[in-house]
Image (cartoon, helix red, strand yellow):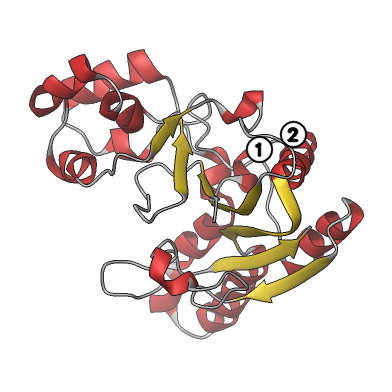
Amino acid sequence: MKFLNLGCGTKTCDRPGVVNIDLSILLRIKRSALLSKLVPIILNGERLKKFNALPENILVHDLSTGIPFDDNSVDVVYHSHILEHLDRDIARGFLLEVKRVLRPGGIHRIVLPDFEFVCKRYIAHIDASDSNSGEAAKHDSFVGEVIEQSVRREAAGTSHQRPLRRFIENILLGDARKRGETHQWMYDRVSLRSILEELGYSEVVLQHFDSSLVVGWNGYGLDVDENSDEYKPGSLYVEAVK
């Protein structure tokens, strides 16, 4: 089975048939013999740990130029928390590009933040805050769940670095928007289903992090953490069949 893990970052899978595809800095370093030798100097902490765990089945590629596979050649395409970072017109083109490479009956698994989930939490917290001043003091964090990543200026990972490293990374890599980290749109189960059906997918199915039409899904480990718990709580899981 040919399985594409698009925009994987460091959330990779080493199972046979899987191709992990991204243009992230850690994957570029992994594929470079020269840069790999400099890893102890340019990486530290959690980044170094993630780098050391990367498998060899990596393809460094800019997905904005398309998916480098033939028509009707792939069994499964998976991507997590990518679609919301694309402008809406670009997102539709991306979904069609996935459909192009999928074989008939192939499965397109999409994971992204669930706008319904964060909005329900926000509304519920308004009610809780009306009668509890302690809860009211926390309310900004619930607003942040809805809009923070759309207005963020500095990349999250860089903001936690020491001052010199932080300065250099911002100069070299740019702000959060330039790195593709900000949200350009949000989706829920209604809007995403509507788009996929409009684009001609034959079947659209809501899933959970541990359920899938993909045989042996839980063995891929892509939607779970090291403890087999949900990797990104608050996500929407949708599968579309070509």
Horizontally, residue 186 falls left or right of residue 82, namely right
Q: Could you tell me residue 53's position as x and y percent? A: 21, 47
Residue at x-position 54% and y-position 76% = 125
Q: Secondary structure at mark 1?
A: loop
Q: Amino acid at mark 1?
A: Leu
Q: Which residue is the site of mark 2?
A: 90
Q: Could you tell me residue 169's position as x and y percent? A: 29, 21
Q: Residue furthest left?
A: 40
Give residue 34's quadrant in the image: top left
The C terminus: image quadrant: bottom right
Residue 149 in the image: above or below residue 136: above
Residue at x-position 62% and y-position 60% = 109
Q: Which residue is the site of mark 1?
A: 86
Q: Could you tell me residue 62's position as x and y percent? A: 54, 25
Q: Nearer the viewer, residue 46 or 138?
A: 46
Number of residues whose C-alpha sits closer than 10 Å to that of mark 1, classed few (under 14), some (14–19) or many (20 or more): some
Q: Badges 2 and 1: C-beta atoms under 8 Å apart?
A: yes
Give residue 48's quadrant in the image: top left
Horizontally, residue 118 falls left or right of residue 202, namely left
Number of residues whose C-alpha sits closer than 10 Å to that of mark 2, classed few (under 14), some (14–19) or many (20 or more): few
